[in-house]
Image (cartoon, coloured by chain):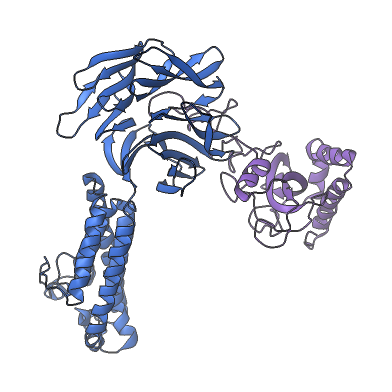
Chain colours: A purple, B blue
Amino acid sequence: MPQPEGTRLDRQAERLSARLAESQTRKSFLGRLGAAALAIAGGSAVAAAVKPDEADAFHLCGHIWTTGSCPSPYPPLARIDRKGYPLHPSSGRPIDNLGRIVDSAGYAMDGNGNRLRGPDGAVLPPAPRTRVCEDWTREQKGLRDLRTQGSWFRCCSGRIRKVVDCCSFSRRRINGDASLTGYCWGGRRVYCVMYYDTGLPC
Amino acid sequence: MLETFTPAVCGSRKRQIVAQALFAVSAVVTAAALGLVLGTIGNVLGAERAVLIAAALALLAAAREAGLLRLPLPQARRQVPERWRFELPLPVWASGYGAGLGAGFFTFHPVSTFWIACAGALALASPAAAALCFSLYGAGRALMVVWPRRHAGDPTAAVERLAGKRGALLRANAIALVACGVLLALAPTAGGGVRVAQNAYDPSYSGGVLAFATQAGNVVVRSPGRPQIVYENASQPALDRSFLAYVDGAGVRIVRWLDGTEVGRVPSRTARRPALDWPLVAFVRREGGWRRLVVRNIVTGGHRVHVSVRAGAQLGRPSLRGGRLAWHTVTRSQSSVLWKPLKGSKRVVMRSKVALVSNPSLYRSRILWTEERSGVSYVRLDWLGAGPRRTLERMRTRIRAYWTTTLGPGRGYWTRWALGTGAAAIYRGTY
């Protein structure tokens, strides 16, 4: 369980996160839908409960547990979009698997927003852009059962951050030691974590 | 010189520490600069084969240090100028002594190890790596100034004690040199690639001849003992013995590269990326919503489509050698390097949902390709079928990447390019 942080507001945030997680562990579709709706549309409710300071963190803001980040283009900052594809950790713009900022069609761009050109002067073709949990972690760690499942919320840089579990049936997590159930469900356990910045103020 | 760094000579304990620090910084910086210069020279000269010479020199030096051979060393038998410490301010003479000893060339060496390190830095052909290695030499020089003060009141006594162990030190040095020689001999490609052409890409190698495209828009053919031949307004060269295929404004043209005689042509303007294995030419052609990899026999006119992918996918520059065809495909979800016998089914060399694998080239039963991941890129070599996979070169950077490759007997060529400027160069490595 999340560590108590000592203040009343923090405890409220813990309870809210726990409720979100519990609604998912019951395998309730409505529960998961409710959590998503609260995160996206009802962000102000979460914001009201989350302390407007940086959350404690072991290796990324918002993560108070020891499980490591999933493999990503900018380790250990496994920032993802809503669908689990990688984003640039600082700018939040979509990046391909090589860590290059890309446009909506997947073409790599330079700092001025122009499409990158190769040594032959032609526009570089798009490189693969795949999901951090289901594709990156699966290939690099050799696990075939990975799913993006549980999540919880923290305040980071004045915005609500959704920390997301990448879950597996493996009893060993990315750190190499025993994995925890965390907010995963269906018998899966937390293999590694990612995060999604909602953009909602807190 | 060690007695120079005493409170008595420096003026106080504090000034001694300042002098030692300046000496150490100067020695490390100068030694690193020497390594940088040697690594750059090795890189420019194309000294990757010199690694074997360095290995041989290390073994010779080991024999010398073990007393098995008597060989003179090319060196100045001087010491640092003593008058500096009387005539110059402390910061200047301390730094000057550090620079003199860090550079190595200006003072006496009782053993030959320094010169082996120089040969190794040349053979390394990597300025940054050589600078890093040589900075350790500078650090060693600095240690000899600091160390005696920590263990004995009189630095000369410490040096005398060290000299008393000369026999053991020489034996240890000989063993270290033997280890260096063996390691160098076992790792002939440790230095990575050596640049062979600047502002150039798309290398193609056959029979000792190298062709490549220049960023000025030409194709150059380099043959040993001949002046290089330039084909203007051409790109994407593919070489096979005396034949050269390249792309011009009208399609793919095949010539005898020595005299430019045209021997064949693929007239389609959509034909690109030729690979040649005379009389066969492979090329990528766009047809409606598809990209197709076609192999045509220039003599008989027969042709066959070997690969088709949707136009949204990337179908890379093929390689055609000895009845085998290799290529790469890239989609938004994965990249693959594949090959097939011309009369057989396709086989996967590598497929990844994370890395960008591309630009394969064939030589007999070997295949070379590039693999790019976030922040690190590799040039990989493998046997077709099963075999140990090797990395010929690795770059840990986000600002440079690999482009096309070509493979020959015992050597491979690959293109490195800078993402910011587009500047490209061709490098050679051995396997």
Q: Quick one: B247 or A166, which is closer to the camera?
A: B247
Q: Could you tell whether A172 is left or right of B296 in the image?
A: right
| Frontmost residue, B170 versus B262 | B262
Question: In the image, B318: left or right of A48?
Answer: left
Residue B62: x %, y % from top left: 22, 71
Q: Is residue A14 left or right of B98 when viewed as pictured?
A: right
User: Which one is nearer the viewer's eye here, B51 or A60?
Assistant: B51
Looking at the image, which residue is at 77% across and 62% down? A3
B214 above or below A66?
A: above
Q: Residue, x 24% and y 35% (percent of image)? A: B208
Residue at screen point 11% across, 74% down: B83
Q: Which image quadrant is residue A178 in?
A: bottom right
Q: Quadrant of residue B332?
A: top right
Is residue A202 visible from the viewing direction of this image? no
A195 relative to A11, above or below: above
Q: Position of residue A144 (x, y in %)?
A: 69, 45
